[in-house]
Amino acid sequence: MNYQNPRVVDTASILKARLPELSSKADILKAIELKALYDELKVLPADQKAAFGAEVNALRGELEQLVRSVQAESTDTTPIDITAPFDINSKDGRPQLLPSETGSQHPLMFELNYILDIFYRMGFAAVESREIDDDFHMFGSLNFAEDHPARDDYDTFMTTQTDANSKPFIAPAHTSTMQHRALLKYRANLEAGKPISVIIPGRVFRNEDLDARHEHTFYQLEGVYVDKGINVGHLIATLKTFLQEYYGKQLEVKTQPFYFPFTEPSFEFTLSCPFCDKQGCNICSQSGWIELLGCGMIHPNVLHAAGIDTNIYTGFAWGGGIDRLVMMKYGIEDVRYFESARLDFLRQFS
Amino acid sequence: MKISLNTIKRYGYDEIFKSPIDELADKIGTQLGGLEKEPFYLGGLYEGILVVRVVSCEDHPDADRLHVCMIDDGGVANDVERNNEGLVQVVCGAPNVKAGMTVAWLPPGSTVPSSVGKDPFVLEARELRGVVSNGMLASPSELAITDNHDGLLEIVPEEVGPELSKPGTEFKRLYDLDDYILDIENKMFTHRPDCFGLLGVGREIAGIQGIKFTSPEWYSLKPKLPTPSTNDLKLNFNNELPEAVRRFVLLTMKNVNVKPSPVWLQSLLSRHGVRPINNVVDITNYYMILTGQPLHAYDYDKVSALSGGDGASIVVRNPRSGEKISLLNGKTIEPRSEAIMIATDKQLIGIGGIMGGSDTEVDDSTKNIILEVANFDMYSIRRTSMASGVFSDAVSRFNKGQSPLQNLTIAVKAAEELSLLSGAEMTGEIIDDNHVEQSSFDRQSLYVPVKITAAYINDRLGLELSQTDIKTLLNNVEFKVDIDDRDLIVSAPFWRTDIELREDVVEEVGRLYGYDEVPLNLPTRDLTPTSKDPVLTIKAEIRDRLARSGANEALTYSFVHGNLLDKVGQAKDKAYALSNALSPDLQYYRMSLMPSLLDKVHANLKAGYDQFALFELGKTHGLEQPVDAEGLPAEYDITSLVVAANDKLRQTGAAYYQARKFLTNLVGTELEFVTVGKAMQSFALVQPYDLNRSALVSVKGGEFLGIIGEFKPNVARQLKLPKYCAGFEVDTVVLGNALKQRSKYVTIPRFPKVTQDITLKVPADLGYQELFDFVWSELAKVQPEHTLPVLSPIDIFQRPDDLEHKQISLRLSLASYDRTMTDNEVNQMLESVAVAAKAKFGAERL
């Protein structure tokens, strides 16, 4: 801005020079030099007032603009005493927690704890699954050959970065990524005459488009049990016992043959609808039955990979979604609410 | 996968399907694989539709393209207007309608089959240009048989027989239309290439019902090779890829009459989701549907024209650099360098096992053909298909790994069928390029027989089957079982690619027997308690404590959009990036949780929540983080919380202190807050924070926890954060360790405590903690024996007219374990503290 009046020109250069030094940039608008110009304006003869007034206002406008732009760029803020328990002069408003009745745990996590508790009581250890893993744990250790078509069913996310084998890292599409680790970690149990019994909850990912029934991010619970003489009846009984405890009632269960490379035989596990006792309701789509999880006897190749002798030991494994259990239990209609962080949703679980 | 039961029944398996369909569907669902939907009754589409003969066909008086027909329905239809000869009048616009033709009639009241399930069109008697039409005569498309809508479906008496072509016959009795279609989940058959064929599925359906299945002889027995009288079509073959292409069967046929297939064949293909093309292509598809083995037909003369030298040449090889192929689906692609290609000696003519090329397509002018029945490496097929984005029915069968022991059988049978349908004759010897181990052929099984005992099977299934029970179950699906004392020697039939290990036999027996009968027993174990997982236990406790503090636990995605990283100033090249996410919102693994939480603040304020605290327990990943013992990116378990309040609430004090309140309340042990030093400033974790108003936090004298603070003005602006907003992000495991250290009990003094305050005026830039620690250490020097002091903050005050100083008030309460303290004693202690503070900080006691 080119000002004509020398008083304005001088003031403008003084104030612009001062601006960077100010901790609160807006203070430049309260500078006495600027106020002095306005004071002068009041006493000027009428014929000079208009021109001078226009220039002073223009200067003020320019300064305001400068303050705004500096503020926009600014990282200058007032330091605080980070070691203090509360702010200076905050006697009337000490930092408070929020009322405990507004607090809430996420329903998925709350439910997961409830499930964990049942399995702890049944004698299972627990370990959480990873969120970034490798091809070996996602597929290789689970008897998926390279380029096996069963890999297509998992829609895995991959990273641009690669591991030591030049393979991308993988966002696990099932908690079974932890099976191999769990078998290795607890293999010593077998030698001590005790079973391997572990559950593995965790966050898993599928590269899918979102809608009310499909999430790319969800939670699964995996279970692994290995000992001498373990058979299909043990698998079904274990899952049935858990579900009856979870729903607090007697249930019927069914298995349906299925295919997973890491179990043989493999099943889909179905239970009688605990919400309508097989009468048919919206939750079970009027069928009286709910398909809940995949399971099977652990494939010998998976046990071999962990150095377990399949002539002596057999075992079972299962994996199922937590999200669906919670949606059914609370009647939640849209899976996307879980990761929405909307208080409309979260505070319902206070 | 769609299965038409009548197609299986064509091979004489009526016994398999005698149970009511619902029972059968349940049984299939329980023992074979989930059904995608309820069985579909195809015959239901044809209720009321009749076979009729067009007796006369006249031009419509008022419409050029319409005809007025009198039809004979054998007098079967009720409630329809008839002339004195009993014929019914129908107006028809089809170009091929003529007197004497046998067609399908949809009488008034019937529904157009193709409209069922969409917008059902129910016919009536109505006038068309002044002439009454009673219902309509239908095209194959209207009858939902094929998508052909060029004219009426002509029922050829020679094709359906004299009985079924009689006027008045129910139309659904023709072409096996009185059929049920089952849709079985494909996934179930991932390891069962044989079940991608109807014979395989039929065999399973028999097996689970305890019924013995016997494959048609043309399939199960060694084929009788035809001896062609002539060798007119010269064909050279060379397989450069014997490892990936273990079997390649080729034969040539001359004098093909290419034309549409008979209606039954077109209809059967349509039922399985395959579009009819012409008799040659249809037969290849039909045998694929039946056996799971894809076939391909080439126009011999086109191949020959593209070959150098004499006759046609076929070569199996990898593509040369830059070579392209135009496919039957209209696309032209450059295949990956390891793709299995079919070529002449001059150019590519197809991608082996995936799709044929358009240059050698069989069309109406084709006279001579080459039939290919090959076997391809399943993994190569899948890789090529994924790389080129070409998917086909052949791919979904070949990538399951078809047995290489059935090619010749199927080639011979398909050629026979083609002769019948098109009049073609085989010419020349069959080429059978075979790289499968001879031993597999000798034993008619891909793997050596599995030696197993009944006990091994029973131990794993929890059953008590006898050797005979097992033998019968396996015999039913055409396994060979020899009993040798306690051993069962199990040989899988040649089409089974999945029976290699004992567990595979266990699965087979269990499935055929059914698991509903398995006795249910829990595993037994001793009484050793299981230890709870420490990390999961810590997380549960943190959740509980934060929820009781009034905070709400949120979950947000582990992946974030690059824009969010930009907004909070985190460098994208420090993040693990996803290469294949469908959604742009999921580009990077998040390096800290705070950006995700901050991203949710504004929406919640807008939704009317004026004050809240959101927290999340999650994991972070980043290239800044080390690689762990497994060679994987280290994962940090992180607890993060953000507090926010609407600007209109005009909160007193900085938001920092509320976040701090949540943290100190959570940890319950003393924490240390220090400014973020230079060394830390480049870390992604730190980026969102305003370093003037943030601190690194550690357990006092212990481990580093994380960061706490308010956010940079530009972060706040971009994420529309309120002025009052702060948060922390700490290591969950360290937090858990700290939680374990808290709550040390101290014995309660029996004597009353004396309480006095001290207010010290100190320089404004003196940190509260420094003064507090100083006071505490000075008190220790003068503290009487056997006393319990408690020092707590009361106030920090600054006069508006003295910004150089601030006044810090602390409250000391002191109680003795063995006597009553006096006010004077306590005041003396504070006085001595004041003297020391004056010397140290120039503090003045007020």
Image: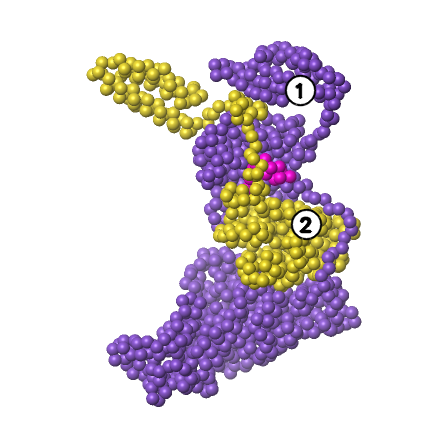
Mark 1 lies on a secondary structure that is: strand
Q: What stretch is highlighted in magenta?
A: B541-559
> Of the numbered discs in the image, which one, if any, rests on residue B7?
none
> Of the numbered discs in the image, which one, if any, rests on residue B813?
1
Chain letter for the purple part: B
Give x and y (percent) for residue A309. Answer: 74, 56
Position of the C terminus of chain B, as image quadrant, is top right
Front-most of B723 and B787?
B787
> Of the numbered discs in the image, which one, if any, rests on residue A118?
2
Q: Distance between the residues labelled 2 and 1?
A: 47 Å
Direction from residue B588 to residue B749 in the image, left or right: right
Residue at horizontal 55 percent and vertical 28 percent from the top:
A95
Give amino acid for label 1: Ser
Direction from residue B817 to residue A140 in the image, left or right: left
Chain letter for the yellow part: A
Residue at horizontal 59 percent and vertical 40 percent from the top:
B617
Front-most of B601 and A279?
A279
Q: Nearer the viewer, mark 2 or mark 1?
A: 1
Give amino acid for label 2: Ile
Q: Can residue B372 be seen in this view?
A: no
Mark 2 lies on a secondary structure that is: helix
Q: Furthest-bottom residue in view? A: B85
